[in-house]
Amino acid sequence: MSEAIIEIKSLSKTFQTKGTEVHALNDINLSIEKGDIFGIIGMSGAGKSTLVRCINMLEKPTDGTVLFDGSDLLSLPDKELREARRSMGMIFQQFNLLMQRTAEGNICFPMELAGTDKAEAKKRATELLELVGLSDKAKAYPSQLSGGQKQRIAIARALSTNPKVLLCDEATSALDPTTTASILSLLKDINQRLGITIVIITHEMNVIERICNRVAIIDESKIAEAGTVQDIFSKPKTAAAQKLVYPGGKRAEKLSSKRCMRIVFDGNSSFEPVVANMVLECKAPVNIMYADTKNIDGKAFGQMVVQLPEDETLAQKMFTYVRARGLSAEEVSGYVG
Amino acid sequence: MWDEATLLMLLWGIVESLYMVLVSTLCAYIIGLPLGVLLVTSAKDGIRPCAPLFKVLDVIVNLTRSIPFIILLVAIIPFTRFVVGTTLGSTATIVPLTLSAAPFIARLVESSIKEVDVGVIEAAQSMGASYMQIVWKVMLPESRPSLIVGSAIATTTILGYSAMAGFVGGGGLGTIAINYGYNRYENDIMFATVVLLVIIVQVLQGIGMKAAGLSDRRK
């Protein structure tokens, strides 16, 4: 059992706007452990951005506590809060780079704020540019970089002060699928190589699927469900979770209850015709009800729902076949008919 | 008519005008720049909201901006005498010019800084930047091109004001235009001063735009 680095206890945030109160967050309890890649997913307006801003106090929570590495951030005086923030890097949907500074200047910026020696900062910036694969862009200004490159620079900047946690606020939402995949693998790499805990805010389930080990689903200002990605993804309990996990969402409930199989692709070769081979092997047709898969660098990502034959043994054979290919498959009842 | 003495006088007029304008702009920025920064940071959505401070500054700036320069020039004569010891000549004109331009510059600075993306300021806060660090390392450098354009506008406006001071013996091209052109009906001298003022405005504005363009890394 590893220890918690961020602990959120009964946290609430209420915004006051001309006479009305908006409860953006309501009694949030979460524990994020060291080394986690923790996903927080929810629809727009669910409060997830407010939640991540409460973690580093960009928004002051109305109620509750946020413990970071054992210290209560709400009770810290300004100066110590600023120190604590240096241990929490943050990246944003819109990158938020300083437009009048070069890539290198941007990476040096947090170290400049912390009073790091100039030569040392430059040396660290060079290392980080290498880490994010942009050594040749040190002297480029943000306006000369693509979206993916800007986010890489933002990541390098966030890492420059050796943070313990990296907060990502919709960090891939402004990027195309291929760039998203490369940024996500960079984040995973950072998590594994540097042991930095990563908190990811997103509205895209495939981001969670691809790199997170634990996830919390936030719905209408509350945590609907939290747990390992495997558990939530295979057996979503709450309506909010089901809506996010099952393609087509609630609409599915109206349809009749023939048995279906959901196949999840997460990085298998996209050149292997798994479904076609399964049909040939089992000599029975299946009906593709839903498919959302992508080919990224020769790897398949996404999910597919197929309607299985009535015959129990045939259906079992198909499950076995798909699982034997290294894909995860689960039965979904009540999806389509 | 266009003898050496006249040319020398006009030349000296240019020097005096530039002296007044540049020194007043500098002094006005020393007052206006911090005022502009405070207007941004103390506003409701600023990095350190403070409604009373904002309200007071806002009212002061609006009040002083609504006094016509020519009135201010006369109204503060005792103050001018107290500061520079005289009310005549270009050095004396610097005092009212500075006081009149400072609130105007505060507004220019305020609008320039407001152009900075709030996300960038939020990013700096997330990195543990202090109030002064955000002002010095984010707000001012990030709005630099806009601040430079603003300073070109401020300088040319102050040049216009400085010519007005000619009516009360403020020195520079304005005084020459009043003394020769207006009082002695020497229209060609009046015309010459106007042409010179136009050229100076063009040059100052040109330098400002060029400098702003060169400093802008957003394109």
Image (spheres, coloured by chain):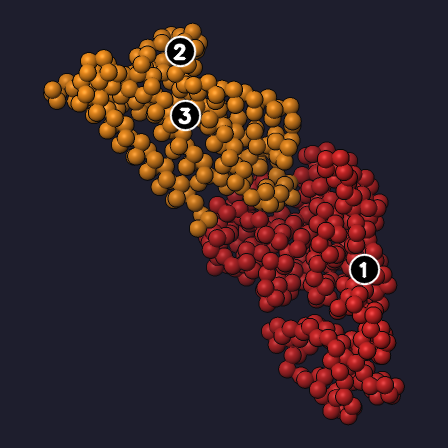
Tag 3 secondary structure: helix
Residue A286 left/right relative to B123? right
Image spot of residue B138 (x, y percent): 54, 40
What chain is the red one? A
Q: Residue at x 65, y 27 (%)?
A: B51
The quadrant where residue B121 appears: top right
Specify the quadrant of the image occupied by residue A231. Answer: bottom right
Q: Is residue A49 above or below residue B18?
A: below
**Chain to which mark 2 belongs:** B
Check the residue under mark 3 and report the chain it is in: B
Viewer-nearest residue: A181 or B17: B17
The reply to whether discs 1 and 2 touch (Cβ–Cβ < 8 Å) is no
How far is mark 3 from mark 2, CA to CA?
A: 22 Å
Which chain is orange in the rendering?
B
Helix, strand or loop status at disc 2: helix
Image height of A37 relative to B206, above or below: below
Quick one: B70 or B120, which is closer to the camera? B70
The verdict on a common chain for dots 1 and 2 is no
Mark 1 to mark 2 CA distance (whole Å): 72 Å
- Amino acid of disc 3: Leu
Q: Is residue A325 visible?
A: no
Pair 3/1: label in front = 1
- The residue under label 3 is B26
Q: What element carries label 1?
A: helix
Q: Which mark is residue B74?
A: 2
Choose between B138 and B2: the one closer to the eye.
B2
Residue assigned mark 1 = A240
Q: Quadrant of the C terminus of chain A?
A: bottom right
Q: Nearer the viewer, mark 3 or mark 2?
A: 2
Which residue is painted at 64% across and 32% down in the image?
A: B44
Going from the N terminus, do you reach mark 3 or mark 2 first?
Answer: 3
